[in-house]
Amino acid sequence: METEEKTVSRKTDLFEKCYQFKTADEVKAMGIYPYFHPISSAPGNEVVVDGKKVIMVGSNNYLGLTEDPRVKNAAADAARKYGSGCTGSRFLNGTLDLHIELEDRLAKFMKRDASIVFSTGFQTNLGTVSCVVGKNDTVVIDRGDHASIVDACRLSFGKIVKFGHNDMQDLERVLRNVTENGLRGGLFIVADGVFSMEGDIIKLPELVEIGRKYGARIMIDDAHAIGVLGEGGRGTAEHFHQEVDITMGTFSKSFASLGGFIVADKEVINYIKHFSREFIFSASIPPSAAAAALAALKIIETEPERRVNLWKNARRMKKELQALGFNTLHSETPIIPVVIGEDLDTFRFWKALYDNGVFANPTISPAVPPGQALIRTSYTATHTDQHLDRVLEAFEKVGKQLGVIS
């Protein structure tokens, strides 16, 4: 029997979108492309970017520990003792005594039963939410939640519902609708403690009250709050004197390292250890990262004056940027946004700041709503008054040149 050859026509090349993407090249040609600029120095308050020395107000180095000799020496000593990597999953050959010590210390610090450490902060949310949320469950998230929470929900088999940003009335409306319309499984509320673009804090007391009313479990992403909020630096729950079921944190901010963790009841941690695909099928954080996080944790516990200075700097910058006429939204933390408006105008503002010796972060849609593009600034415990003076001078000069302020 003769086989007839048929030509299969393809309507779209999978890579067509790649070849059609020209926006980045167009912005580069304008000389205002703000991304992927190499830093050739330690990530401190003054850095060398593209060969130019600038003041850094775009990092999450809140406690100024990335250059602390104790943290660097701990990382170097661990690399010398354990080598450069673990070559395997925590589930099998990738668990060091350093990892166990770090988890025990984190649980004790956070005053919880147990802790589990993941390889990155993003992965921590993926591996936690997608693990505990099943097909009959519903996960309820703030519209301003971090991308890692959104992606974690997509990986779960549960129903995803959003409530208006920090709008507790809308949260109750959503929970009521869910429970009155055939909820078959559990309810899980996941929200940022500190929102990474706007710098505002979740209204946790109201969220907890409403969540408990409907029998929901609560997880708070404290990536930008551990080390920053609370009398002891334990984050949003301590700040408000509340209790939540799971608290997540990262090592890439206050801990001056890489990785992430959650703390919770020991039964929850044990379940995630044995069922989280992101945990089981990923290599563990290298010994240098674990040792650096341990050293940073000790400093967080024993040097509260760092938080005092961090907040002094944050309050000063919020007050003075507002006095200059900038819109800083509802920031309540060392993350202080400066709203510019349109994307290209924000890139131009970023470039002018850089030319005047200041490096900050331009943030555009979808990270913020369209037309609300902003310069995200963030401050550290180790910024000096001289640093901040120069930053304010640059913002005032650029703001007036570009017509953002008068």
Image (tube, rainbow, N blue to C red):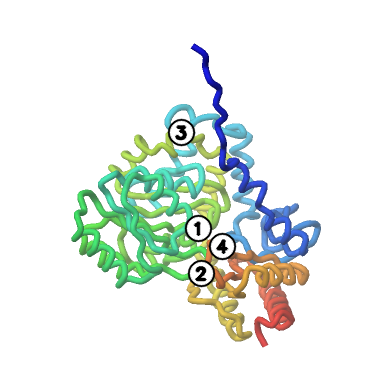
Q: Quick check: marks 3 and 1 in contact, CB under 8 Å?
A: no
User: Label 1 vs label 2: CA separation?
Assistant: 25 Å
Q: Position of residue 72 (x, y in %)?
A: 63, 48
Mark with earlier residue (1, 2): 2
Q: Quadrant of residue 314?
A: bottom right
Q: Residue at x 31, y 58 (%)?
A: 244
Q: Residue at x 67, y 47 (%)?
A: 19
Q: Position of residue 38 (x, y in %)?
A: 73, 53
In the displayed structure image, the side of residue 274 where residue 194 appears, left or right = right
User: Label 3 vs label 1: CA separation?
Assistant: 31 Å
- Which structural element holds mark 4? loop
User: Label 4 belongs to which residue?
Assistant: 62
Task: Using the image as rendered, state which of residue 381 and residue 160 is in the foreground.
Answer: 160
User: Label 2 vs label 3: CA separation?
Assistant: 34 Å
Mark with earlier residue (4, 3): 4
Q: Which mark is residue 281?
A: 3
Mark with earlier residue (3, 1): 3
Mark with earlier residue (1, 4): 4
User: Label 1 belongs to which residue?
Assistant: 300
- Which structural element holds mark 1? helix
Q: Residue at x 69, y 74 (%)?
A: 391
